[in-house]
Image: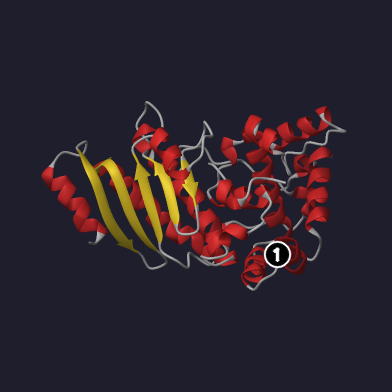
Amino acid sequence: MPYRPALLLLLLTGCLGARVASQRATLELPHATFVIEAQEVDARTLEMLEQGLKLASEELTIWGGLRVPVTLHVLPDRERLRKAVGQEQAWISAWARFDTVHLQSPRTWSLLPPRQSDVDRMLLHELTHSLLYQRAARAETWRKLSLPLWFDEGMASYTAQQAYRWPGLEDLARWYERHPEAKEDPLRPSRALYAEQHHLVYGAAHHAFTFLVDRYGRAPILALMDAMQNGADFEEAFRQSVGLDCARFEEEFRRFVRLRGFRRATRNSKAPTPEAPIQSVGTSTPSEDASGIGGAPPPAARSR
């Protein structure tokens, strides 16, 4: 059943706030196909999800686009989401896999009505995970992917332009100052650090991935995913595509943060506000000056 007629049927049979027990619809777009399976959803929420999926399908073309249709499971509340994906993190509101995304209904994210920009960013974040798994592996192998959390979560946050959600580079620099000899590192967090300071960990991921793109461009990311699709592990794929070991890159990023290289930024690095619509990342220009750049759970166990 095509999505738009299904949506119009909901509008004609009740008011925008009316909910139906369940809804299934297919949205076929030029660059992606989605199936929406929603429980206790209203027509307005379906409209917002449709708009978010359309935007995401276009934005993801910078990484080559989705290769496999994705089913979006919309669940009425966080508790049912946790049960559906088998996770207990208090902050979880969505969960992405190779060809599925489970999403807590935007109506229940807070006491206030959801904003379209928040829905857009959430869907783009989660679908970036699915794209990465699809382009770096296959349906039968993606669970075996061994990706650093900073790369997986960083790519999703970078694509969805979610810097505003996380601690900034100055916060990260101060953390390193307070923990000069610590074995813990937000870039390669233990499960304990991930659970206790997930905002710091996600911030480090976002900034590290942004640093990677600003310094080396997007082409190596595409080459890295292709290399993994052809059988290379992450470390080898990173070495082939970027031209240096991942560990060396990570140390470059830590040094950049500790020495506060971001203060010498020559480009406007102001993060978008939550209220602002997503500006196409396909039109941004990475800095040519590297000095002016603004052991984690497995892919199947990432929460957003």
| Residue with the most extreme bottom position | 230
* Secondary-structure class at tag 1: loop
Figure check: 177 above or below 48: above
Q: Nearer the viewer, residue 102 or 172?
A: 102
Relative to 278, does residue 233 appear above or below in the rendering? below
Q: Is residue 170 visible?
A: yes
How many marks can you see? Answer: 1
Question: What residue is pinned by disc 1?
Answer: 233
Residue 162, image x, y percentages: 56, 43
Question: In x, y percent, where is residue 243?
Answer: 79, 66
Q: Amino acid at mark 1?
A: Asp
Say which residue appears at 70% left-offset and 64% top-offset. Answer: 233
Point out residue 285 in the picture as x, y percentages from the top left corner: 63, 58
Asked whether residue 268 appears in the rendered view, the answer is: no
Give left or right: position of 163 versus 49.
right
Q: Residue at x 65, y 29 (%)?
A: 196
- Please name whichever residue, 159 or 77, is drawn nearer the observer in this view of the structure: 77
Is residue 283 found left or right of 49 in the rendered image?
Answer: right
In the rendered image, the residue lying farthest to the right is 181
Residue at the left extreme of this rendering: 13
Q: How is the image coloured?
A: secondary structure
Residue 50: x and y in percent read 33, 52
Where is the N terminus found, in terms of image quarters? bottom left
Q: Residues within 10 Å of mark 1 (few under 14, many from 20)?
A: some
Which sits in the foreground, 42 or 134? 134
> Residue placed at 77% from the left, 65% from the top?
239
Left or right for 152, reference 175: left
Quarter where residue 226 is shown: bottom right
